[in-house]
Image (tube, rainbow, N blue to C red):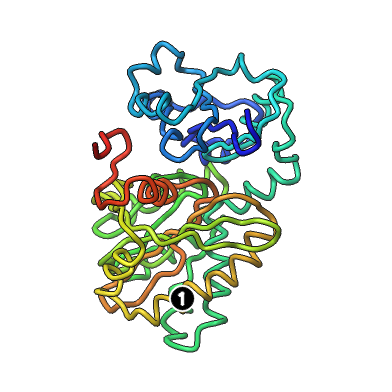
Amino acid sequence: MTDNTAIYLFNPSTEIALAHNGATFTPRKAIMLFEQRLALLPALYANEGSAILLPHCCDINEAKALPYYNLISSRSLRIITKNDLRGRTAPFNPWGWNRALVSMLNNAGYAGSSLPSAEMMDNMRNLASRRTAVEIWQQVCNKHSYDRQFFTERIPRCFSNLDEAVAFSTMWHEGAVIKSPWSSSGRGVFFTKDKSAEQISMRISDVLRAQGHVIVEPWWNKTMDFATEWQACDGNVNLLGFSLFATDEAGHYAGNCVADQATIIDSLTKHTEKDYLLKQVEVMGNILSEVIASRYSGPFGVDMLIDSNGLINPCVEINLRTTMGHVALALWHTYQREFTFIPGNELPA
């Protein structure tokens, strides 16, 4: 491999592995099948000449039938398995890091220097929790010179006590959102509107039993989802761009808009003021440098939303990994045309 090449892995179960936090981890069957089907997703954004590591549930012959296999030869990519890792030193770029992945790479004989240390993994795990959004919200409120009371009242809260979490969840007339600390793509999110007190209590109890604490925040009357995509390096963050994504009624990820940045910003500013949008992102950049870049290097995304009054929720959650927004940015660079990207679907000719 040349100097600009790396080994890529699509492992979307990484947040659940972080919650498990063990040296070994086996995702549920449905997630394993999802990882297998989209194992070649890195072909959309990997450096030419790089390698894509297949998950343990997929072999090279099966890979020939997977989406994006046609890009392997055209982009001079290679497909490898765990057995090919011994002695390799090329940088390793997973979708996201977790302790089980580090253990697997060590056991497989990977010899590169890009593996995070135990201390770095502890930092990543803590930052990847939705508790980080609570910390960032508190800093955002300290920096707001407008609608300070509104934003302060709506700071998400983290609970380890069932009764306290239930009380906060039920105090909002319009409903609240209950979130597991670690989950991905809208999973681990529960909306309390039209739910009974018993259902709310059961949900919170389940999350506390599984992960030790729970995040609760007031519901927002959303008109648009979007995200900002970042790269952290050497204690600083670099804004890579805005991304627009869709979710279903349950809040699960449903696809990304591939378009140039001017078009995306125009879409956002139909729902909020442009100066306000850019100021929010500038404030977030300063906070992210302090909170994220001091303890993490790599790609990450910040999910945001705009409400019916044009106000911006600046940190719905942090995705401390590569995101579909990063993929959409790479696709725009490649295709220079607008389309909707749904993972696994065919790309424009």
- The picture quadrant where one finds residue 44 is top left
**Vertical order, 294 against 269 (above or below):** above
Residue 83: x and y in percent read 61, 14
The residue nearer to you, when weighing 67 against 291, is: 67
- Helix, strand or loop for disc 1: helix
Point out the image quarter for the N terminus. top right
Residue 326: x and y in percent read 44, 49
Q: Residue at x 74, y 26 (%)?
A: 111
- 139 to the left or right of 28: right
Q: Residue at x 58, y 74 (%)?
A: 139
The residue pinned by badge 1 equals 280
Count the labels in the image. 1
The residue nearer to you, when weighing 252 against 256, is: 256
**Residue 321 visible somewhere in the drawing:** yes
- 53 to the left or right of 107: left
The disc labelled 1 sits on which kind of residue?
A: Gln
Q: Name the residue at the bottom extreme.
A: 145
- 290 to the left or right of 265: right
Residue 241: x and y in percent read 44, 61
